[in-house]
Amino acid sequence: MNQNDPFLPMTLKRRLATRRDRVVTVLRRTMSPPTAAPRREGPPNLLLLAVDTLRADHVGAACAAGSLTPAMDAVARDGLRFADANAPAPWTLPSFAGALTGTMPCLHGAGMGGAMRNMARQAPSRLRDGAATLAGHLAARGYRTGAIFSNPFVGFGLAESFQERIYRNHAAPDVAALALDWIRRRADRPFCAFVLFNDAHEPTMPPRRLCAPLLEAAGAGGYGDAQLRALARWGDERAGVPHLGRAPLPLDAPAALALAAKKALYAASVRHVDESLATILARLEDWGLATNTLVMIWSDHGEEFLEHAEDALRWDHDPRDLRAIGHGHTQFQELLHVPWLARGPGVPAGAVVRRPVSLIDLAPTAVAWLGQPPLPLPANAPASLLGRAQSPDDAAAPAAGRILLAEDIAYGPDLVAVRAGPWKLIARRRPLAALALYHLDDDPRETRDLRDAQPQRLQELLDAAAVWDRAGHGRDGDDRGEPDLSGDWEQFDDRVRRQLRELGYA
C-alpha cells in the first residue's frame, strides 16, 4: 500500500469543507478572545460527547484489538462507568431521541412505523412536536445550548431543541475543533453542548497511520486502496472484495479475510474518535473548565459483524437482502449494549454501575446530577417507557425488578427486546411471538435459546412485552404498528437525502 490516504476519493468534498471551517475558526479565534470563566458561580456545564455506532466491547482493555480508547478509559477511571447500558433502539434517530428526552421511541415518536420496515424506501418520523428535551429543559434554566453533529438524523427534530446547531460531515478532529470553538465562545455562563462523532459509522474511513497496523495484524496488509474503499461500505465484488452482507455461510477464506479487514477499519475509526475526545478533554483542563463540567460519553447503538448470521439466515427478515451486518435490523446485544461514561463534579472516581440501565436514563440522570429540576416526562406512562435518574452514590444497588425495552427496528418486522435482569427476550410484536430467550450472564453472546427450557420466564417477559404494546402503541389513537403513510422520502429535500447517502443510507 502506498502512503497516501486510501479513502481520498471518498472524502475530497469533505476535506474542502473542512479547510473552509478551519480558516473561519482561526479568524474567529484571532478576533474574539475566549469567554471561559472557570471560577464563575452557578451550576456546572454539561458536555455530551456521543460516538455514533460504538460497541461497548470496543471501549476499554477488554477489546480484542487492544485498548483503542485511552481517553475514554481515563474518564472511566476518574469517574463512573455504566457497565450494562442498553440502547432503546438499534439505530441512530430513535436511540438519540430516547437519550435526550428520557422516553422510549413509542412516546417520543422519532423513528419508524409499520409492521414491516425498510428505511431504504420509507422515511422515519420526526420527533413529536412538544416533546420535552434535555436541551430545552436546560435552556429554560439559563443554559446556552449547542449541537455540533455529523449525522443528519439528529436534524429530525432533536437538533431544533438546541439554541445553536452546526451540522458537518467532518472527521473527528474537525468536529472536535468546531466543538471547542463553540465552547470557547460560550463558556462565560453554564452551557450544554452535544457533540456527535460519526467516524465509526459506515463508511469507515480511518487514517492510514491508524488502520495500517490493525490491517497487518488481521492479515489484510496486502489489500489495495480500491479494496479498502469497498470495505468502507462492507465490500464490493467488483473491487475483488466479497460483500459481507451476502457472503455464504460458513465464510470461505476471502470472506473471512474481508471480515477481519472490516473489523480493523472499524477499530481504527474508534481509535480516531478517541484521539479527538482526548483533545477536547485536555482543552477543558487548559481552560480551567474540567472541574465544573459534567462530561458524559456514550453511543446510540453498536454494530454487527456477522455475529448472528445463522439467526439472520433462519429468520430471513431483512428486506434489503443483507444478512447480519451494520445496525438497525436486529435486537441483539452487539447493537444494544453501548458504553456510557460520566465524569465531573459529584461523580465518584472509579465507580462501576453493574445493574442494567437504559439510555433513556441519560437525560433524567444528567439533569439530576446538575442539580436542576426533573425533566418533565409524560404522565400516566408505564415505568418501562420512562427514564429514571441514576444515583452516582449507589453503584452497587440492584435493578430491583426493572424492565428494560428496545424497539423501533429500521429494517424488517416490528421487533422488541425485553430485559429483566439477566433475562432477555426478542419477540415479534404483532402477533406477539417469541423468537429467542437468553440469559445474558451465562450467555453474553446470545447463542443458546432457552425458550423451551424456561417456559415460566418466557411467559413473564411476553407479558411485559404485551404491557409495552398496549401502553405505548394504542394511546390517543396513535398506533405505530400500523403503516405510517407519512414516511415518504420525497417530502425531504435533496440536501437531506444526499447527506444520508454519504453515510451509507440508501
Image (cartoon, helix red, strand yellow):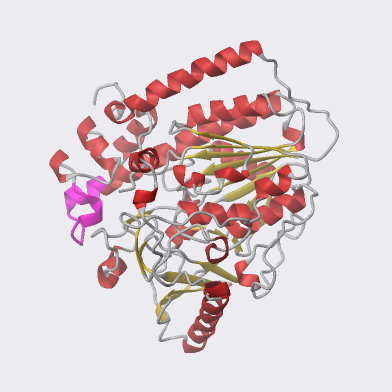
Front residue of 70 and 434: 434
Residue extent of the magenta highlight: 242-258
**Identity of the residue drawn at 48% across and 83% down:** 458
Q: Position of residue 501 (x, y in %)?
A: 33, 42
Classify residue 101 by image quadrant. bottom right
Quadrant including the N terminus:
top left
Q: Position of residue 3 (x, y in %)?
A: 29, 21
**Going by the image, does 342 lie left or right of 23?**
right
Q: Position of residue 131 (x, y in %)?
A: 62, 56
The residue furthest top is 30
Front residue of 467 and 380: 380
Query: Vertical placement of 3 versus 379: above or below?
Result: above
Q: Is residue 227 magenta?
A: no
Q: Position of residue 419 (x, y in %)?
A: 54, 71
Is residue 238 something one can see in this rendering? yes
Query: Vertical placement of 135 versus 421: above or below?
Result: above
